[in-house]
Amino acid sequence: MRVVSGIQPTGNLHLGNYLGAIRNWVRMQDAMEDGSQCLFFLADLHAISMPHDPAELHKGTLEMAAALVACGIDPAKSVVFNQAQVPQHAELQWLLGGTARMGWLNRMTQWKDKAGKNREGQSVALFTYPVLQAADVLLYQATHVPVGEDQKQHLELARDIAQKFNNDFASEEAPVFALPDPIVPPQAARIMSLRDGGKKMSKSDPSDMSRINLADSADEVMKKVKKAKTDPEPLPSEEKGLEDRPEALNLVTIYAALTDGNVESVLKDFGGEGFGKFKPALGELLVETLRPISERFNGLLEDREALDAILARGASQAREIAVPTLENTYKALGL
Ligand code: ADP
Ligand code: NA
């Protein structure tokens, strides 16, 4: 089994990113059996399909790499790298461009959503983005690709491209590309803003008090939890008592996610208690969970050499897997 997964290189990572995404990848890595392997790459090549700030992209790529490792993605178990350091991604994308059909790309709902009515004004990269995604996984003969609802269509496209290429340029006994299967990631927690239970916790929220950052100190975490918006009622003993209390529900959800419990199990312990008791307990739990992560995260960002070394090693491992596939592709095409 070889799992390949790409991650947007965002910076300013927060608790929502950890509980909603990164922790799942760590669990996937840790569930791999002997002989199986995960490749996690930072999709920096994809990022240039939209207007972007080069300095921000560079910073975001490093921060995401540091966050992955700090949260438990182990470079000794998994291959961690960024796309731009493995030129075979861009190369294979061009080679697959002869096989992908305009009509297939025109049907991609993400392209339609992102381009809207202004198709003429979009970058070529935004249109061909799914071909790069196909290259990202076909390059490594991925057997499985974790996909959310919004990415299912792109994985289908990758399979269509692989199938047509194998059909047109290879024999059935010696296909150039493996057809990857989707894996649906487990339902992850959705963490809301600490200032407004109707909004997702997000890096783009202007208020820093709305989120717990992976880089926050213990004092900052305690302060943010203490100031988190709540209501004057004590916690109910059953989940339905939280129906119209989004802020209270969010804090209980965070507690549940951190303890691998659920809302019911947290209410069993804290039902009837006020926030004067629940918030300090939640704050301490957060500090305890995040301390090793933020220490490692901040440490890696300060030790650029160590971080660069991790990415360079990952890129070289990735290239080793990628090169034979790329050579076969050239050969099959008569190049
Ligand atoms: P942001 O909303 O801060 O811009 P991104 O859109 O960059 O975060 O998301 C990166 C990853 O983290 C995605 O997989 C996304 O689903 C997850 N994620 C982001 N915010 C949350 C949240 N509040 N709760 C759960 N998961 C989240
Ligand atoms: Na976002």
Image (cartoon, rainbow, N blue to C red):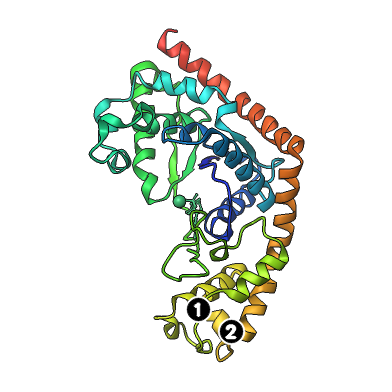
- Residue 135 image point, x, y percent: 45, 28
- Residue 250 image point, x, y percent: 50, 72
- Residue 257 image point, x, y percent: 57, 68
Q: Callout 1 environment at 10 Å: few (<14), some (14 to 19), or many (20+)? A: many
**As rendered, which of 118 and 163 lies closer to the eye?**
118
The residue drawn where x is 47% and y is 86% is 238
Which mark is on residue 248? Answer: 1
Which mark is on residue 275? Answer: 2
Which mark is on residue 178? Answer: none
- Residue 143 image point, x, y percent: 49, 38
State which quarter of the image contains the C terminus.
top left
Is 305 situated left or right of 24 in this image? right
Q: Secondary structure at mark 2?
A: helix
The residue drawn where x is 63% and y is 47% is 68
Residue 51 in the image: above or below residue 227: above
**As rendered, which of 206 and 317 lies closer to the eye?**
206
Q: Sequence-wise, which precedes: disc 1 or disc 2?
A: 1
Viewer can see residue 104: no
Q: Quadrant of residue 164?
A: top left
Question: Does the residue tagged 2 have its C-beta within 8 Å of any atom of ligand 1?
Answer: no
Asked whether the residues under the numbered discs 1 and 2 touch, taking CB atoms below 8 Å apart as contact, a structural biologist would say yes
Is 154 situated left or right of 327 in this image? left
Residue 6 in the image: above or below residue 273: above
Q: Quadrant of residue 110?
A: top left
